[in-house]
Amino acid sequence: MFYKMLVKEMGIIGIDSLGIVVLLATFMGAVMCLQTAHQVSGWYPAYIIGFTVRQTMILEFSPTLIPIILAGKVGSNIASQLGTMRVTEQIDALEIMGVNSSGYLVLPKIIAGLFCIPILVVMSMFLGVASGAGIAFVTKVCSMAEYQEGIQLDFESYSVVYALLKTSVFALIMTSVSAYHGYHTEGGALDVARSSTKAVVYSAVIIMITNLVLTQILL
């Protein structure tokens, strides 16, 4: 049963979130390229465009903003699902049958988040840098050789490790906070909506505070 629930949650958290991640990463990389080109035009070498897009996507946008956006989509879904099960006494029924309700309902969501969200973040890094290259080629703000030089300039593999460490922590926060608010919902339908809202808000706030702490520690 646990394996089936895990696969189901991986589909909900990972596959169903592909569209929003692709959209955000693609347009953010393109916009970052154009904004950087506008700022550095005539003042700095053109390869700075590729360097800035790479650093922005790997260090901050992908590992931080993608989880925050997913907190609105995935987190609210987790909280509303568990909240509805709580107020309709489905969780109570599971416990009466001797099923560990938190292990059966919550743990697969947390594990699926820890597995899927870093993969989505890595994909967003690639898409952001690639879309930046695409828009640079189309608009001619810099050549592909200059953009590639900027991508390779002073690259440290630790930047990706740092991003994935942050992402894993944020995935744990997002899934656990959302599951907590949904699991402990009391009342009726309106309380489910309140739990869903609180899950998103609390997740975003905790992620931003944790981001500051982790950045200071890891960098």
Image: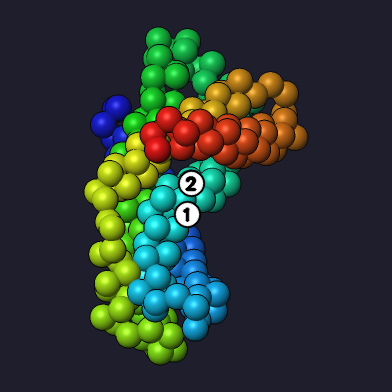
Say what amino acid the circle numbered 1 marks: Phe
State the SS at label 2. Answer: helix
Mark count: 2
Classed neighbour count for the residue bearing mark 2: other residues with Cα under 10 Å, few (<14), some (14–19), many (≥20): many
**Picture quarter with the C terminus:** top left
Q: Is residue 149 visible to the viewer in this orientation of the structure?
A: yes
Say what amino acid the circle numbered 2 marks: Thr
Q: Residue at x 54, y 79 (%)?
A: 38
Residue labelled with disc 2: 64
Q: Is residue 82 visible to the viewer in this orientation of the structure?
A: no
Q: In this view of the protein, which residue sits in the foreground, 173 or 181? A: 173
Mark 1–mark 2 Cα distance, whole angstroms, equals 6 Å
Q: In this view of the protein, which residue sits in the foreground, 215 or 154? A: 154
Where residue 108 sits: x, y (%)?
Answer: 36, 30
Where residue 1 sits: x, y (%)?
Answer: 29, 27
Q: Are discs 1 and 2 less than 8 Å apart at CB?
A: yes
Classed neighbour count for the residue bearing mark 1: other residues with Cα under 10 Å, few (<14), some (14–19), many (≥20): many
Q: Residue at x 72, y 30 (%)?
A: 191
Q: In this view of the protein, which residue sits in the foreground, 218 or 101? A: 218
Residue labelled with disc 1: 61
Q: Residue at x 32, y 69 (%)?
A: 150
**Is residue 162 rendered to the left or right of residue 63?**
left
